[in-house]
Image (cartoon, rainbow, N blue to C red):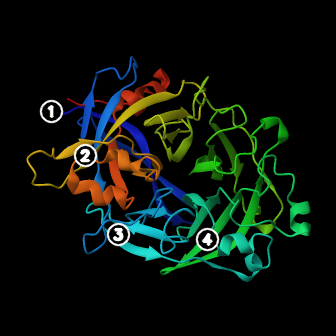
């Protein structure tokens, strides 16, 4: 019989009077899913686990792929996967959230476009948020499934704020136009921006001024701690910051100063190695859990220990796109030149991943002619990775052996 290893405490988004419910002891099978192939081959001398993932094209109800949505962020909500579009998407995709069925990969609904509450229309950020806000990640509030929190990145296309607003928000510790945390309330298919707060980085963090290399990943951890994944700082290093979204957080429009939780994020001597997506993985027992971050340029997932006991574990990924072709010269799945992950969503023992087609490089994926139009349309794919017990075993100590059980 298959060995069953119980490591996970799956997080339910059901809300009760006591807040977020954690359901413990989810069974994790050692077998891989059919769309996932594991190999022990080293990739360029790496000792990291290497996983091949077979993707699915995301389509509408008529079977057409999503045209240039620039999918940026992913979250599981009401049994669907939600993704938001950034400012470089087609105008019809911007300021909208798309709901995707995880079985058929069909778009089941489109929420938005987002409107602004009166307090936001009167704020310094009204012009930017009503025009082309560059939304790069989203999370669901742990205590209210109808509330999303989004983060903005590049605001260079929005024009300057008024003199008064520039003076008020000039000390960002980073870019001239501040990064924004945005609260969005969903009512049926409508999305309303109700609150906004700018982020401030302490100067000693040396974040640097990189308008298009800002926050691209977010994840809620324990005790309403929101983790923020930065693409790069002034030294070219990816970083993770945090801020607590407490009951008073949205009651002011002052800066929200982030902190550095001193997590073990990989460092590099050269190149660009940004974090472009992130989610939280709760673990059974007393362990505070992991952050799973997508390193887009490296085609990797990083397992980052919130207990700060284990070094970051790296999973190398190989992405395969379905050709959907009868041409005998075409393989059923073809290896992608680049996928460019921008969204991570943990659902039980599965990690869903969505890509954000990189316009400069996406055409390099074209091999089988059946996929040419999909790549030229900047159509995204969804991938699923099943967590393996050997990846999670290092995070449990002997005293917590009861959280790791096996049956033959």
Whether the residues at callouts 1 and 2 have beta carbons within 8 Å, the answer is no
Disc 2 crowd rating (10 Å Cα; few below 14, some 14-19, many 20+) is some
Please identify, in this view, whether the residue under mark 1 or under mark 4 is nearer the observer: 4
Determine the secondary structure under disc 3: strand
Please identify, in this view, whether the residue under mark 4 or under mark 3 is nearer the observer: 3
Q: Identify the residue position indicated by label 4 in the image.
A: 184
**With respect to residue 203, does 378 lie above or below?**
below
The residues tagged by marks 2 and 3 sit, at their Cα atoms, a distance apart of 26 Å
**With respect to residue 254, does 397 lie above or below?**
above
Q: Which mark is residue 56?
A: none
Whether the residues at callouts 1 and 4 have beta carbons within 8 Å, the answer is no
Whether the residues at callouts 3 and 1 have beta carbons within 8 Å, the answer is no
Between disc 3 and disc 1, whose residue precedes? 1
Front residue of 398 and 229: 229
Looking at the picture, how far across and down is residue 174, in whole percent? 78, 47
Please identify, in this view, whether the residue under mark 3 or under mark 1 is nearer the observer: 3
**With respect to residue 94, does 219 lie above or below?**
above
Left or right: 55 in relation to 188:
left
| Residue drawn at (39%, 66%) of the image | 67
Looking at the picture, how far across and down is residue 340, in whole percent? 44, 46
Between disc 1 and disc 2, whose residue precedes? 1
Looking at the picture, how far across and down is residue 258, in whole percent? 75, 47
Q: Which mark is residue 1?
A: 1
| Residue drawn at (35%, 53%) of the image | 382
Please identify, in this view, whether the residue under mark 4 or under mark 2 is nearer the observer: 2
Visible in this render: residue 347?
no
Q: Identify the residue position indicated by label 3 in the image.
A: 107
């Amino acid at each position: 019989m298959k060995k069953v290893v119980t490591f996970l405490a799956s997080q339910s988004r059901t809300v009760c009077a006591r807040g977020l419910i954690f359901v413990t002891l989810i069974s994790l099978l050692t077998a891989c899913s059919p769309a996932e192939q594991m190999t022990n081959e080293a990739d360029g001398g790496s000792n990291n686990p290497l996983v091949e993932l077979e993707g699915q094209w995301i389509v509408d109800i008529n079977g057409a792929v999503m045209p240039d949505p620039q999918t940026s962020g992913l979250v599981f909500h009401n049994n669907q996967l939600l993704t938001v579009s950034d400012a470089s998407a087609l105008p019809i995709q911007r300021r909208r959230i798309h709901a995707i069925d995880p079985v058929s990969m069909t778009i089941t609904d489109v929420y938005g476009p987002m409107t602004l509450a009166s307090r936001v229309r009167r704020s310094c950020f009204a012009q930017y948020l009503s025009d082309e806000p560059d939304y790069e990640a989203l999370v669901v509030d742990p205590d209210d499934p109808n509330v999303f929190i989004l983060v903005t990145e590049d605001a260079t296309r929005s024009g300057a704020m008024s003199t008064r607003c520039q003076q008020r928000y000039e000390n960002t510790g980073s870019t001239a136009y501040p990064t924004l945390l945005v609260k969005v309330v969903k009512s049926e298919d409508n999305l309303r921006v109700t609150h906004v707060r700018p982020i401030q980085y302490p100067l000693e963090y040396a974040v640097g001024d990189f308008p298009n290399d800002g926050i691209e990943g977010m994840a809620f951890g324990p005790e309403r701690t929101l983790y923020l994944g930065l693409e790069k700082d002034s030294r070219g290093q990816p970083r993770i910051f945090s801020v607590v979204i407490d009951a008073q957080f949205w009651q002011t429009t002052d800066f929200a100063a982030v902190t550095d939780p001193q997590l073990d994020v990989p460092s590099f001597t050269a190149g660009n190695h940004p974090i472009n997506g992130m989610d939280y993985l709760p673990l059974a027992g007393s362990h505070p859990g992991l952050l799973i971050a997508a390193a887009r340029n490296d085609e990797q997932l990083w397992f980052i220990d919130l207990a700060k006991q284990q070094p970051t574990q790296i999973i190398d990924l190989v992405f395969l796109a379905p050709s959907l072709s009868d041409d005998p010269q075409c393989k059923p799945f073809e290896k992608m030149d680049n996928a460019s992950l921008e969204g991570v969503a943990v659902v039980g023992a599965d990690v869903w991943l969505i890509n954000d087609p990189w316009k400069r490089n996406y055409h390099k994926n074209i091999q089988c002619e059946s996929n040419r139009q999909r790549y030229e349309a900047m159509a995204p794919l969804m991938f699923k990775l099943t967590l393996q017990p050997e990846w999670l075993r290092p995070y449990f100590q002997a005293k917590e052996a009861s959280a790791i059980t096996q049956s033959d």
